[in-house]
Image (cartoon, grey):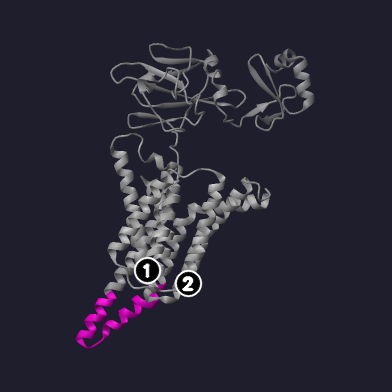
């Protein structure tokens, strides 16, 4: 839900603010034609976007068109006709809708072909975003009508906000078409300006905040002082003007917080992948087996463990009782053949793959195939313990990439070093040995029995 709210704000908020500034020098627009033109532009652009080509030639043409339209819009700001205001209202909403409609994640508005809670929530987020955008444009216009000196600085800042990523997209298309030479400096510029889309809501929120502060100093405070007017009629008018300006100020500040706060929530919370619960370290007992008390893992929750091999490779696995009314353990590696070692989390009574967000049917955990976690073979249960062999855990070494830093001993000269910094290592009799020098490595490789005996 939060993604669709943020994406609507990113695509339409700067355009709405530009249009609000455009109307400050024109007669106040009529609500009906404004709403009608905006809706036609929104739905027309969104649905047309699905049928547009994905070629580089089209991307180049469309990007160039957007740049030209922004420049023409700025030139048009020297005129004050209402008709041109309506024309730009339609054009800019249409172009913004074409961009929004090409968003790759727009198809995730629902995962099914039926009306469900997810679809309703996401559509509600889109509607909420549109309402916020419309109010932001109207409030900015209300503020700038009272503080005309803000109009051109805000127009230029918003135009630059839109032109910067478009210039990057233009250069990228030209480089892909081999019109521009691919250079490190150009790639660096393209990467910086195109990745700045995530800052649009912060920037727009900042502009609304700046406008509100100037409006406070230039309009609200003077109108508050004007309430001392002794004549009754003028006093009532002054009070009404002050109250209206105060409402505009509060709403503008609120929308600034919503714009920046929505983006901040998405960046810091909603877009972050689920965090894995802490993995409990386990070690091999004297019998060479890992023992886990059954009482610890029979509650139906996901219990995550980690075993560290002698070379420092961390092997995560989890245990879950698959049925609520009987003991049927699933013992699996915290990784899948399709998605890698990002692991699984449990939310409520669902086990979810972190990488692809697939919900795993809990009774199927322990069986191979699909996005199911890779099963651990050859584990056993006693009356009190779940028992897993070293060999079974070692079979999962290739599924994981995390290396834990360990202090190890060179078996040749007894020196201390860490596994992550040792340049030489050798596997012998199922164990990895680390060496502080090439000479020690060669000596051990030639006669390992000699040094193992000496080290025992």
Magenta stretch prevailing secondary structure: helix
Reading the chain from its start, which is encountered first: label 2 or label 1? 1
* Nearest the eye: 187 or 363: 187
Residue 239 is one of the magenta-drawn residues: yes
* Quadrant that contains the N terminus: top left
Q: Residue at x 45, y 32 (%)?
A: 356
Q: Is residue 264 left or right of residue 173?
A: left
Q: Residue at x 31, y 82 (%)?
A: 225
Q: Which mark is in front, 2 or 1?
A: 1
Residue 347: quarter of image: top left
For disc 1, the marked residue is: 83
* Nearest the eye: 44 or 276: 44
Q: Position of residue 138 (x, y in %)?
A: 34, 65
For disc 2, the marked residue is: 152
Residue 117 is one of the magenta-drawn residues: no
* Nearest the eye: 203 or 306: 203
Q: Which residues are magenta?
A: 214-242
Can residue 264 be seen?
no
Give SS at disc 1. helix
Circle 2: is it few (<14), some (14-19), or many (20+) Cα within 10 Å?
some
């Amino acid at each position: 839900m939060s993604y669709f709210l943020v994406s609507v704000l990113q695509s339409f908020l700067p355009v709405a603010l530009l249009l609000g500034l455009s109307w400050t020098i024109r007669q106040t627009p009529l609500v009906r034609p404004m709403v009608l033109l905006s809706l036609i532009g929104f739905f027309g652009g969104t649905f047309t976007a699905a049928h547009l080509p994905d070629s580089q030639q089209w991307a180049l043409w469309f990007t160039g068109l957007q740049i030209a339209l922004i420049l023409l819009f700025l030139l048009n700001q020297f005129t004050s006709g209402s008709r041109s205001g309506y024309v730009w209202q339609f054009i800019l909403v249409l172009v913004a809708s074409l961009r929004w409609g090409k968003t790759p994640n727009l198809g995730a508005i629902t995962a099914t072909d039926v009306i469900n809670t997810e679809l309703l929530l996401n559509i509600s987020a889109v509607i909420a975003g549109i309402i916020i955008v419309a109010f932001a444009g109207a409030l900015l216009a209300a503020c700038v009508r009272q503080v005309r000196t803000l109009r051109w600085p805000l127009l230029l800042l918003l135009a630059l906000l839109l032109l910067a990523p478009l210039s990057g997209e233009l250069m990228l298309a030209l480089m892909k078409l081999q019109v521009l030479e691919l250079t490190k400096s150009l790639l660096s510029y393209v990467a910086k300006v195109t990745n700045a889309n995530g800052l649009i809501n912060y920037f727009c929120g900042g502009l609304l905040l700046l406008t509100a502060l100037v409006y406070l100093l230039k309009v609200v405070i003077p109108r508050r002082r004007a309430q001392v007017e002794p004549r009754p009629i003028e006093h009532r008018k002054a009070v009404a003007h002050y109250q209206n300006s105060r409402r505009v100020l509060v709403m503008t500040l609120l929308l600034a917080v919503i714009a920046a706060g929505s983006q901040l929530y998405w960046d810091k919370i909603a877009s972050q992948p689920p965090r894995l619960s802490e993995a409990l370290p386990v070690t091999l007992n004297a019998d060479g087996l890992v023992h886990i008390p059954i009482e610890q893992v029979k509650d139906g929750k996901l219990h995550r463990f980690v075993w560290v091999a002698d070379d420092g490779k961390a092997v995560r696995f989890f245990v879950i009782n698959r049925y609520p009314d009987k003991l049927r353990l699933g013992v699996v590696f915290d990784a899948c053949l399709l998605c890698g070692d990002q692991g699984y989390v449990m939310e409520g009574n669902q086990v979810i793959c972190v990488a692809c967000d697939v919900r795993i049917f809990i009774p199927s955990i322990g069986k191979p195939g699909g996005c199911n976690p890779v099963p651990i073979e050859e584990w056993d249960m006693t009356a009190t313990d779940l028992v897993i062999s070293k060999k079974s855990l070692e079979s999962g070494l290739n599924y994981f990439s995390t290396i834990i830093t360990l202090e190890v001993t060179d078996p040749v000269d007894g020196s201390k070093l860490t596994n992550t910094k040792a340049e030489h290592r050798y596997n012998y009799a199922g164990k990895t040995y680390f060496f502080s020098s090439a000479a020690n490595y060669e000596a051990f490789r030639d006669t390992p029995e000699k040094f193992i005996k000496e080290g025992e």
